[in-house]
Image (cartoon, helix red, strand yellow):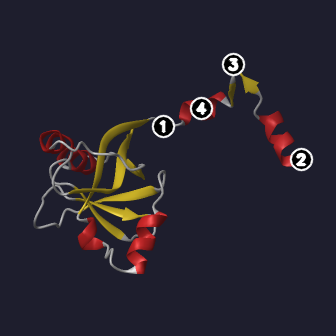
Amino acid sequence: MAEIMKAAEESPIRSGFFNRDAFRDRRRMLLVLETGVAGLSYKVDMDTPEGRALLRSLKPGTELLLLRDTDNEHDRWAVSVYTMDKTELGYITRFKNETVARLMDQGKVFHAYVDKKRELPSDPVQRRRTAAATEDFDLPFSVYMED
C-alpha cells in the first residue's frame, strides 16, 4: 500500500490523466488486417490432444508473434504466425500478406492478437468476398501496426 501511495505522490493527476508524459509516450496501434491463420491444419495437428489443447489455449486477446519469412520459396511475401513461445501456427494468407510484409521490410513493428470467432456469411459469394480460401477462421486474429 505504501508503494501505491508513493507512486501517486510522484505522479499526480493532471488534466484528468495519470502522468500525462506516459500517456503521450504510449504508441498508437493502427488496425491493419483482420484475418484467420492460413495453413493452421498443416502446422497444428488437430487430431491430437496437444493440438486441440493449443487451439483452446489461444483465447481472444492472446498476443501472437509475426515473423517475416523471407526464405519462403512458395510466397515471397510470407509472414509466419507464432505463439509467443515460438510454436508455429501458420501464415497470414498470401492473398492479404503483401502490405504487411512490405511494411515489415521497411522496419515497421506489428502486433497480432487472437480475436473471438466470427461467423462468416453462409452465401458463397459473400463468403469469397470476406475470406480467402486458405484462411482458417478457427483461429481469427487482428494485426496492428505501431504508429
Sequence order check, earlier mark of 4 and 2: 2
Marks 3,1: beta carbons within 8 A: no
Image spot of residue 37 (x, y percent)? 28, 58
User: Which residue occupies 48% across, 57% down?
Assistant: 59
Side of 147 where 90 appears, left or right: left
In front of the other: 2 or 134: 134
The answer to whether any part of residue 77 appears in the image is yes
14, above or below 88, in the image: above
Side of 47 where 85 appears, left or right: right
Marks 1,4: beta carbons within 8 A: no
The C terminus: image quadrant: top left
Q: CA distance from mark 1 to mark 4?
A: 9 Å
The amino acid at mark 4 is Phe
What residue does disc 4 label?
23
Q: CA distance from mark 3 to mark 1?
A: 20 Å
Residue 27 tag number: 1
In front of the other: 145 or 130: 130
